Image: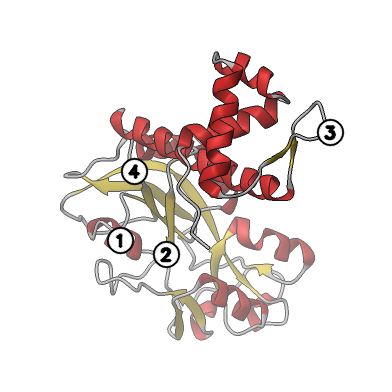
Amino acid sequence: MSNPGTPTFDQLQVLLCVVEAGSFAAAARRLNRATSAITYAIDNLEGQLGVSLFDRIGTRKPELTAAGKAVLSEARTVTHGVDILRARVKSLREGQEAEVSIAVDVMLPTARLVDALQAFQASFPIIPLRLHVEALGAIAQLVVAKSAVVGISGPLNTSIEGLDRRHIGTVRLIPVAAPFHPLGRKGRKSPGEARNHIQLVLTDRSPITAGQDFGVIGLKTWRLADLGSKHALLLAGVGWGSMPEFMVRGDIEAGRLVALDLPDWHVNLYDMHAIWRTDTPPGPAAQWLIDRFAQQI
C-alpha cells in the first residue's frame, strides 16, 4: 500500500470551511469560489490521502466519515500552527523579540510575578517566555551571561559594569522563629540575645556578590541556597532567620511562626530592581514586562 500524498494548505482550508459552513455551496460562497471548485479541491484531497472524507450518499448535507473526523482534527492543528507561524513572523518584522528570558529573585512576591506574567501572556500571546528563579547575585550573573535579558534582582551592594537598573519596589523582611524556639517567647529580646542562636541565612550561589552578607547578625549561621528549605527549618525550630513578610504571613497568623522583636535587627526592606545589560537593552516585550513590574509599586 502506497503512502498518502501531501495535501496542500489550501485543501485543508477548504475542508475546514466546508465543515464550518455546513455544505459545499455555503463554503463556495464564503470563499468566493464556484461550488465545482470546492468539490474539486475535496476530491483532490481525498485522492491525495487515499480515504473518503465525506459520506455524500443518502444525505443532503455532507457528513464526515470516521476518517474525515480524524483528518479534520489534524487539519485544525496544522492550520492553527500556520496561523501562529504567521503571527510570530509578523511580530519579528515589527521588531518584537523571538523569546523573552527573565530571571527573578526568589524574594519577589508570587502575586506580583503572577500578575506580570498573566498580563504578559495576554499582551504577547505568541512570544515564548523563559523563567529562571534564583537568589541574590545569581540574578545578575544570569543577565551578565546573557542567559536572561531581564533580571528582577534584590539589592546589589556592588557596582557591576555593563548593567543598568530600575527600581521596582521593596519587599518587607521580618525575623521569625518557631513559637517553641528559645527566641519565640513573647516580648522584646535583650541586645545580643539573637547572636547566641543559629541564624538561617540564604546564601549566594554566584561569584558576583559572594561573601556579602545581608542582615546577618548571628555568630552561628547555617547557610542555605534554597528559600523553601529555610522556611521548612524555621517551622521545625532549627534556628531563626528573616523571611519575606508575604511568605510567612499565614504562618504567623496560624501560630506556626512568631515575629521576633530584636533590637539588633535593622534590615527590614529588601530593594528590588529590574536589571539588564546596557549593550543588549530590552526589546519591546521585555521593556513592557519591566514597566509592568514598575507599575505594581
Mark 1, residue position: 142
Q: Is residue 83 above or below residue 230?
A: above
Residue occupying image coordinates x 58% and y 25%: 38
Whole-percent x and y of residue 262?
A: 56, 68
**Front residue of 40 and 224:** 40
Q: Residues within 10 Å of mark 3 (few under 14, many from 20)?
A: few
Looking at the image, can residue 31 be seen? yes
Circle 4 sits in a helix, a strand or a loop, which is it? loop
Q: Is disc 2 in contact with disc 1, using a CB cutoff of under 8 Å?
A: yes
Identified at 51% across, 85% down, the residue is: 196
Q: State which tag comes first along the sequence, 2 or 3.
A: 3
The CA distance from mark 3 to mark 4 is: 51 Å
Q: Do tag 1 and tag 3 residues touch (Cβ < 8 Å)? A: no
Residue kind at label 1, given as amino acid type: Leu
Return the mark for residue 58: 3
Density class for disc 1 (Cα within 10 Å; few <14, some 14-19, many ≥20) is many
In the picture of the structure, the residue carrying the numbered disc 2 is 134
Q: Position of residue 125 (x, y in %)?
A: 50, 38
Q: Amino acid at mark 3?
A: Gly
Quick one: SS at disc 1?
A: helix
Q: Mark 2 or mark 4: which comes first in sequence?
A: 4
Frontmost of labels 3 and 4 is: 3
Check disc 2 and give the amino acid type.
Glu
Amino acid of disc 4: Ala
Q: Secondary structure at mark 3?
A: loop
Q: Which residue is mark 4?
A: 98
What residue is drawn where x is 34% and y is 65%? 138
| Mark 2–mark 4 distance (CA, rounded to whole Å) | 23 Å
Q: Please, is residue 204 above or below residue 99 in the view?
A: below
User: Label 2 neighbourhood size at 10 Å, few (<14), some (14-19), many (20+)?
Assistant: many
